[in-house]
Amino acid sequence: MNLCGKSLISLKDYTPAEIRYFLDVAKKAKDEHKRGIRKQRFLGMTIALLFEKRSTRTRCSFETAFGEEGGHPVFLSSADIQLGVKETVEDTAHVLGRMFDCIEFRGFKTRHVEILSEVSGIPVINGLSDDFHPTQVLADLMTLEEHFGALKGKKLAFVGDGRNNMANSLMIGCAKMGVDVAIVAPDELHPESDLVKLAEGFAKEAGSTVLITSDVDAGIKGADVIYTDVWASMGEEAKLAERIKLLKPYQVNADLMARTGKKSVFMHCLPAVRNNEVTPEVIDGPQSVVWDEAENRKWTIKSVMLCLLGKENE
Ligand code: CP
Ligand code: NVA
């Protein structure tokens, strides 16, 4: 598999075999690191880490994964650079493309990630936009596979804001990898129909299913994984009061977990707001795998950087 030079904007643009490859490289990177093997595959290389929004896991994953392989990550928040104040995305892309080997961008507009990729001439990785969070879904798939041994035939129910970046990306990633996916959300918060159609097409090819429903019991029935995310994503804080009203019946609590009919695991991309989208008894309880999921951000992000920079076989 040769993914060298590509960008990762959404998993829409990757085949199931390519996603499989990212997961295999991540597994190997994690295993080697645990066995004390240290490599220097990014020695002499640089990555620009652009953050318009806050981050703990994503930033730390990029910095530690790139740095421990000998590379030099440069963190640039909106408070540090000209982008968005005195300079366009295009001009920033020209400059970064001349100085760096790779760019990570976390921000609002997905179009900005696309422009960075089109103009810079180097691989660009979407570290979260309003629409997508592809590196998170790679970590989620890795965690699911570690827990259940396989992806195909498993069912993941995302319960909450069904039109946010996580719901969108899980729908695509799961559909492609043969995981049945249900988006369980009130009618007002269902994903865009074009994206649903796209996911349904991917699911058909992979032999999986996509269900969009406002009926909690119908959506969570038989789910191996219950997944949720914050009710107001970064940039939507003003909508929180309205969302709390809409989403209260969709809170993931012990009662909901008991109604799947299975011994389901609980997943959350984090950060979490306890007693909104999830109760402490669930996120801090025995069914939760959120810390494995958080750790796997690092190994999947390392894998993406290795593959896009053509270093995974060194
Ligand atoms: N899950 C995730 O992207 O976390 P951060 O916002 O902390 O990066
Ligand atoms: N939907 C959340 C995900 C955070 C990792 C947000 O965009 O804020």
Image (tube, helix red, strand yellow):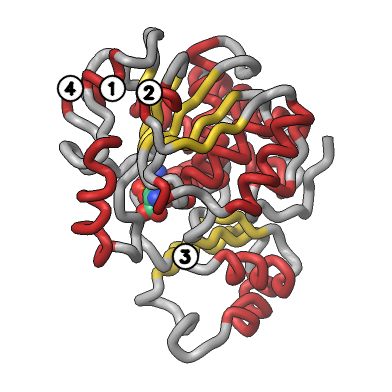
**Mark 1 residue type:** Leu
The residue that mark 2 highlights is: 217
Precedes in sequence: disc 3 or disc 1? 3
Give percent across and percent down for residue 274: 18, 38
Precedes in sequence: disc 4 or disc 2? 2
Residues under numbered marks 3 and 4 in contact, where contact means CB atoms less than 8 Å apart: no
* Marks 4, 1: nearer the viewer: 1
User: In the rendered image, which quarter is residue 89 located in?
Assistant: bottom right
Give percent across and percent down for residue 79: 35, 76
- Asked if the residue at label 1 sits under 8 Å from ligand 2, the reply is no
The residue that mark 3 highlights is: 107
Give residue 281's mark.
4
User: Compared with residue 9, is residue 183 higher up or lower down, i.e. above or below?
Assistant: above
Residues under numbered marks 4 and 1 in contact, where contact means CB atoms less than 8 Å apart: no
Is the C terminus in the top left, top right, bottom left or bottom right quadrant?
top right
Count of all numbered marks drawn on residues in the image: 4
Q: CA distance from mark 3 to mark 2?
A: 34 Å
**Mark 4 residue type:** Glu
Q: Residue at x 30, y 49 (%)?
A: 231
